[in-house]
Amino acid sequence: MDFLSILSLLGGIVLFLFGIEIMGESLKKVSGGRMEQVLQNITSSKWKGALLGCLVTAVIQSSGATIVMVVGFVNSQIMTLQQAVGVIMGANIGTTVTAWLLSLSAIDSSNLFLQLMKPANFCPILGVVGLGMMIGGKKQRTKDIGTGIAAFATLMLGMNRMSAAMSPLSEDPGFTSLLTAFSNPFIGLLIGLVVTAVLQSSSASIGILQAMSLSGTMMMSSAIPVLMGENIGSAITGIIGSIGASRNARRSSWFQMVYCILKTMTFMVLFYGLNAIFHFSIMTDIASPVKIAIFHSVFNIIAVLVFLPLSDFLLKIVYKLIPVTEKEKEESENRKELQLLDPKFVTTSSFALKQCRTVINRMADFTREAVQLSTEIVLAYDEEKANRVQQLEVTVDEYEDTLNSYLMRLTGKNYSDADSRLFTLMIHSIGDLERMTDHALNIMQCAQQMNEKKQTFSPKAVEEITVFNRALNDIVSRTVKAFQEGDLNLASTVEPLEEVIDGLNMQIKKRHARRVRRGKCSIELGVVLEDITTDYERIADHCNNIAVYMNQTQDNELETHDYLEHLEESDRLEFREMAYEFEQKYQLPALKKDDDAAAPAQDDDSTRIAPEEIKKDKDKKAKKKKKDSKPDKGN
């Protein structure tokens, strides 16, 4: 084999490996997280799990990627180790699809249709189609599909180039002696294991083996041991992918290793033991890509049928290798959602965003609970509730840090329009949710301070704070529900309520100032009340920010302040009607005559939005509608 032939072989290997890598990545993008979603919703049936593992691997063309995903799911506690068993075994069948695709290169016929099935003939056409979609596609999904098609054409051309480079070797005595060495079961197994471990792809190593078989000098006795070694080598990808993961996740990767070792050793002992007696004719057959694909598929299908019923026994071996610790049993409930943000999902950005959505929804629940508890202890202090608020604030801080770090790793990915809006919304909303719990903590500390000093608000202040509490919990509940459900109609009610809460804050401060001036309340309590109501108002502001972000992401051309101006201009009447309804719902108790006696005229508590103004707006809108509905006489 001369120097130029070696260069040609290396060129084919590069094209082949590059095509496999790019095709796998593009297929994952096109799936948009749906493959992961299928795995996430796996049932408890091992057989269904095996079927799904086979199908997912066949789609994304990588058993290693499927195993790494499973490791991530187990690490995130989305999937139990028992559920992962079937998927792992099924992935070993799904990966054999690649060998069948590569076997197309062995087609030999004068029939035009069959000739077009050969990679050397159809790949240039596929390449042109894929390239056209990549360059001319307007949607990212079209570009991703084109990339996958072009990558498939590239890997098949690489396969063809490897085969062409291998053809002259059929007359090379050195190459023939090398293949003879492969026929030694242990040497062949070791070579297959090492090559697969280095390439990190059983599909790639089998492709190279199929290309070598096209030389016409390799017998099945040389190919079979290499295939066995490749089965073990493929498990190393999962082992590497589990580094740094939880112990349970490591168990899932080691299950793959134990399974591959046992099925390979069982086959080697039985097959070569029986061959010594019966001398199987397949051993003297000339290897071909089709025969290798058939043997690879049959072996893995039989292995699943035999070992899946014995999976509990395999799990016992794994648990012996990695025993359960007490720390695992005492895992914190609050951190379960954070474990969804597994770094392994970052490569599949669409699915990673869905995981972030689940986590931030839980964060919003914590925020709502913290605000509700803090408002409750303002009027009736409870040490247990105060401790819970403090714990929630720490938890939400942790959620914010983890989510921000995780989302930063997802920056710059190719997203669909929906995913892009979701990413923007989450980036903007996380800080507001965290700041709300900070204000809840401030409120709790004010209540704690009052409890330590045995201070209480006056009955009138209690009545007013009760109204304020209802309004605040209403706006927080509306915001969290709208955010979690993506309800834009509900989100549109937040800003009018926030306006009313601003008014409540001003009214309560004015009323309390009167009581302080008249000696009915201490200055110290007045400062405490002002701090509390200010925190209430700030929480409402953060709720409004989230509602604005939700609407703003539907119209990327509007900045936040432009959006608010646009909202009041286009929906002014509806906005004022909602604000008026909220004012009526959250009216402070009416002032008595003795309360008003010392109050200056400008401190009057009349409603800020008069019904007559709303009526005027309605009349104007009706007149405009009537005018617009009249036919144009000019026509």
Image (cartoon, rainbow, N blue to C red):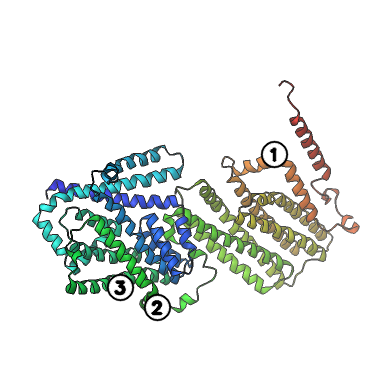
Element under disc 2: loop
Question: Which quadrant of the figure contains the C terminus?
Answer: top right
Most foreground residue, 537 or 204: 204
Answer left or right for 184 relative to 366.
left
**Dot placed on the residue nearer the N-terminal end, 3 or 2:** 3
Most foreground residue, 602 or 626: 626
Mark yes or no: residue 235 visible: no
Q: Residue at x 59, y 66 (%)?
A: 392
Total labels: the figure holds 3
Q: CA distance from mark 3 to mark 2?
A: 20 Å
Quick one: which residue is furthest to the front in this view?
111
Most foreground residue, 324 or 517: 324
**Which of the 4 image quadrants contains residue 552?**
top right
Answer left or right for 88 relative to 481.
left
Q: Say the numbered circle drawn on residue 323.
A: 2
Q: Say the numbered circle drawn on residue 262.
A: 3
**Dot placed on the residue nearer the N-terminal end, 1 or 3:** 3
Q: In this figure, which residue is indicated by the disc labeled 1?
A: 569
